[in-house]
Amino acid sequence: MHKLLKSLALLMLLALAGCAHKISESGYYWGNYSSTYYAYLENPSKETAEQHFVSLTEIVAVSNEKGLKCPPGVYAEMAYIKQKQGKNDEARDFFNKELELYPGSKPFVEKLFVKGN
């Protein structure tokens, strides 16, 4: 019986680990984007901005690791956060990455970049 419980526990752990990097139906990995973005909107602060930036960074890393295209808008959000922190060179790099992946986003990205300056 003890062996069976251990086996079930291991099986459940493996099943949960498999869900850790769930890919959406659209083929993008979103991580915990919704929760960190909501926290940032509800309580805009340096801390929530940093937590959301970390979440965005994780989305990029996992997407690259899994050979997925980074979701649209992720690099633009990273740029916007860096721009609000006064780190315009970093912001420009992230904006350029967004434009490389999604050239059609140029009008939106340009508005964000102008708005932040």
Image: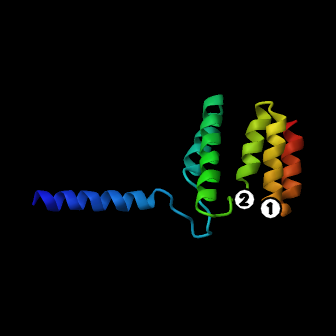
Give amino acid for label 2. Pro
Q: Residue at x 44, y 60 (%)?
A: 19
Q: With 101 as the anchor, is 59 left or right in this view?
A: left
Q: With 35 as the anchor, is 4 left or right in this view?
A: left
Write down the residue under mark 2. 72
| Closer-to-camera residue (90/47) | 90
Q: Earlier in the sequence, mark 1 or mark 2?
A: 2
Q: Position of residue 76 (x, y in %)?
A: 76, 49
Q: Position of residue 18 (x, y in %)?
A: 43, 61
Q: Residue at x 90, y 42 (%)?
A: 114
Q: With 76 as the anchor, is 4 left or right in this view?
A: left
Q: CA distance from mark 1 to mark 2?
A: 7 Å
The reply to whether callout 1 and callout 2 are in contact (CB within 8 Å) is yes
Give amino acid for label 1. Tyr
Mark 2 falls on what kind of element? loop
Q: Position of residue 3 (x, y in %)?
A: 14, 59
Q: Which mark is residue 15?
A: none
Mark 1 falls on what kind of element? loop
Write down the residue under mark 1. 102
Mark 1: few, some, or many residues within 10 Å (few <14, many ≥20)? some
Q: Quadrant of residue 46?
A: top right
Mark 2: few, some, or many residues within 10 Å (few <14, many ≥20)? some
Looking at the image, how many numbered discs can be counted on the residues?
2
Q: Quadrant of residue 117?
A: top right
Colour mapping used in the image: rainbow
Location of the N terminus (image quadrant): bottom left
Q: Residue at x 16, y 62 (%)?
A: 4
Q: With 95 as the anchor, is 9 left or right in this view?
A: left
Q: Position of residue 81 (x, y in %)?
A: 73, 38
